[in-house]
Amino acid sequence: MKMLITVLALSIALSVPAWAATNTVTLSVPGMKCATCPITLKKALNKVEGVEHIEVDLEKKEALVTFDDAKTTVEALLEATKNAGYPSTVLP
């Protein structure tokens, strides 16, 4: 019985990545002011493991980021923008 419970628990634990999903978040990046800002922001976000796609809109001062939530978090994205000199917040 203990072996069955152990095998079941292990199976569940190993299948968690299968539950991961691709998520999209829109970040407000008010510090973007020039044409090179989106390039710098994209480079910083591309370094985050799990980021799949980035669209940066300088006029709206926003970044739309698609990522694998099994590999990264929104907090990691926010940290990456902050470290690049562009603190951001999540838009609803």
Image (cartoon, rainbow, N blue to C red):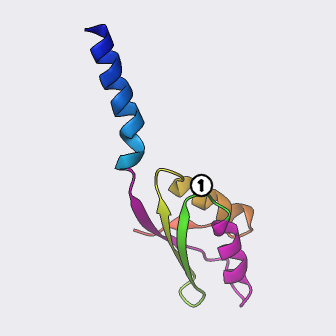
Q: In the rendered image, which residue does mark 1 sit on? A: 76
SS at mark 1? helix
The disc labelled 1 sits on which kind of residue?
Ala
Where is residue 83? Give x, y as percent: 73, 61
Q: Is residue 25 above or below residue 17?
A: below
In the image, residue 72 sits, relative to residue 7, either above or below, namely below
Left or right: 14, with 64 as reference point:
left
Residue appearing at x 60%, y 87% in the figure = 58
Task: Please identify the quarter of the rendering in which residue 92 is found.
Answer: bottom left
Residue furthest toward the top? Answer: 1
Picture quadrant where residue 46 is located? bottom right
Q: Quadrant of residue 37?
A: bottom right
User: Is 37 contained in the magenta span?
Assistant: yes
Residue drawn at point x = 67 percent, y = 77 percent: 31
Task: Give residue 39's position: percent from left, percent from top.
Answer: 70, 81
Left or right: where 6 falls relative to 34: left
Q: Which residues are magenta?
A: 20-46
Q: Give the residue drawn at x 74%, y 68%.
A: 85
Quadrant into which the N terminus falls: top left
Q: Specify few, some or many for label 1: CA neighbours under 10 Å numbering under 14, 14-19, or 20 or more.
A: few
What x and y, as percent, mark residue 32? Answer: 67, 81
